[in-house]
Image (spheres, rainbow, N blue to C red):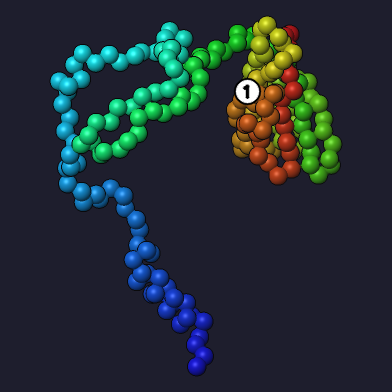
Amino acid sequence: MRRAPAACLAGALALALATPWAAAQTFDNFDVGPLVGFEFDPDALAGTEVPSLGEDGSLPEDDGSITLDITEGQGGAELTILPRVGSAVTSVTQPRTSQGGRATLRALDRMLGRPTDVEMAIGETVMFGRIAIHVVECRFPAEDPASDAYAHVEILDQEGSTLFDGWMIASSPALNALEHPRYDVWVLGCRAG
């Protein structure tokens, strides 16, 4: 007997909806009563010395392991020693930056396959093909101006619609890039004046 495709599809859909695994899963409906054998006694912790982190964020000196004390009646697990992983916590500092007066961008027209370097003053707008590129601000590390550049770039189409408005970073051009089928623009560097 041959069935119509619509009837087969309707039958398969009805069968899929009837199975228990097709229903949406929920994870917040625990039908478990209070934890058996677990009692919290805050007075039992009185006088317990808890090691603190050092000023540089490092763990206290010991044999390189962390001991986890699980007493009877709290699950009965036999886990006592965990190996130490990771390293000391360090802080990241932002390098001091200087304001640039000129920015160098590279623009690519994918249809022509030709990249073009564009040097422009801050606040200047340059037409490249069918897009307008405007550099709002440009910064570079004060200690090493040639190392990196950060430019706030606005890119508009011919109708004035914003295609891109954000910071581009010379060392990571794909981090925040223009998404356009024909054009690609990225910052190469900044310099004073």
Residue placed under numbered mark 1 in the picture: 152
Q: Looking at the image, which is closer to me, 10 or 28?
A: 28
User: In the figure, is residue 36 to the left or right of 148?
Assistant: left
**On the image, which quarter does residue 113 sit in?**
top right
Residue at the image point whose x is 70% and y is 44% from the top: 181
Quadrant of the rendering where the C terminus is positioned: top right
Q: Where is residue 175 in the image (x, y as percent from the top left)?
A: 63, 31
Q: Looking at the image, which is closer to me, 21 or 63?
A: 63
Above or below residue 93? Residue 10 is below
User: In the figure, is residue 129 to the left or right of 175?
Assistant: right
Residue at the image point whose x is 79% and y is 25% from the top: 118
Residue 160 visible? The answer is no
User: In the figure, is residue 33 to the left or right of 54?
Assistant: left
Residue 70 visible? The answer is yes
**On the image, which quarter does residue 151 sit in?**
top right
Q: Where is residue 20 in the image (x, y as percent from the top left)?
A: 34, 66
User: In the figure, is residue 46 to the left or right of 123?
Assistant: left
Inspect the image, locate mark 1, and give the three-letter code of the amino acid beneath it.
His
Above or below residue 160? Residue 117 is above
Q: Position of residue 152 (x, y in %)?
A: 63, 23
Q: Looking at the image, which is closer to me, 88 or 188?
A: 88
Indicate the secondary structure of the residue bearing disc 1: strand
Residue at the image point whose x is 28% and y is 31% from the top: 70
Q: Looking at the image, which is closer to me, 38 or 135?
A: 38
